[in-house]
Image: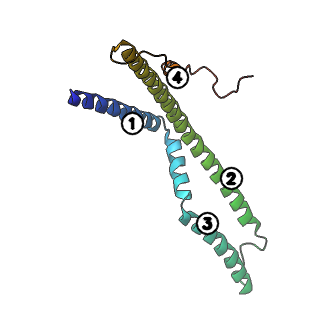
Amino acid sequence: MATDEAQGQRAHVDETVEQLGRLYQEHDERTTPVQRVANRLTASLSRPSSLVVIFGAMIAWTVGNEVARAFGSAALERFPFPDLEFVATVTALLIALLILTTQRHQDDLAERRARLTLQIAALSEKKIAKIIELLEEQRRDNPMLPTRADAVAASMAVSVDPSDDLGEPAA
């Protein structure tokens, strides 16, 4: 009998894990090719090496122009480097848009995961309320246990209605 219970619990856990796996798989399937590129770009730009490369390019541009001018060669531009400023501004805009796109995509997954968590919590709450109800019923029906009213157990045996606003204090 204990083996059957353990298998039942294992099946319940397996079902929950499969449901989470389906959630991630559906999210991955709904990802467009453009979104995949944006996710990869954001992932590569979020590495410290990207900071080093971008900062190094800016230093090389600045120093290269100043060295060229110092040796009498034609520099690409003079201080305050308007072309560098333009490239840096456009790059910053594109990186910000990539981050926003990737964040929106991740927020969608987080929202779906939160809904699933809420569903699991509501189901667990109903199961717990049913267990308390059954325990109270067993206590009432068992002639070896004293019959007494337990207001706390009675209130816990009733499932909470998710549509009730529990966060607002009573007026």
Crowding around mark 1 (Cα neighbors within 10 Å: few <14, some 14 to 19, many 20+) is few
Check the image and report above or below for 137 versus 1. above
Q: How many marks?
A: 4
Locate the N terminus and report the quarter of the image it occupies.
top left
Q: Which of marks 2 and 1 is in front?
A: 1
Give the x, y percent position of residue 46: 56, 57
Give the x, y percent position of residue 130: 42, 19
In primary-sequence order, the first of circles 2 and 4 is: 2
Crowding around mark 2 (Cα neighbors within 10 Å: few <14, some 14 to 19, many 20+) is few
Tell me the kind of residue under disc 4: Val
In primary-sequence order, the first of circles 3 and 2 is: 3
**Quarter of the rendering containing residue 12:** top left
The reply, left or right, for residue 116 in relation to residue 86 is left
Q: Residue 93 carries which label?
A: 2
Q: Which residue is drawn at 67% across and 56% down?
A: 92
Give the x, y percent position of residue 7: 25, 30
In primary-sequence order, the first of circles 1 and 4 is: 1
Q: What residue is pinned by disc 1?
A: 21
Name the colouring of the figure.
Answer: rainbow
Q: Which of marks 3 and 4 is in front?
A: 4
Q: Residue at x 61, y 66 (%)?
A: 54
Give the x, y percent position of residue 171: 75, 22
Do the residues bearing badges 2 and 4 touch, measured as CB atoms within 8 Å? Answer: no
Tell me the kind of residue under disc 3: Ile
User: In 3D space, how far apart are the residues under numbered discs 2 and 1 (Cα atoms)?
Assistant: 35 Å
Q: Nearer the viewer, residue 49 or 149?
A: 149
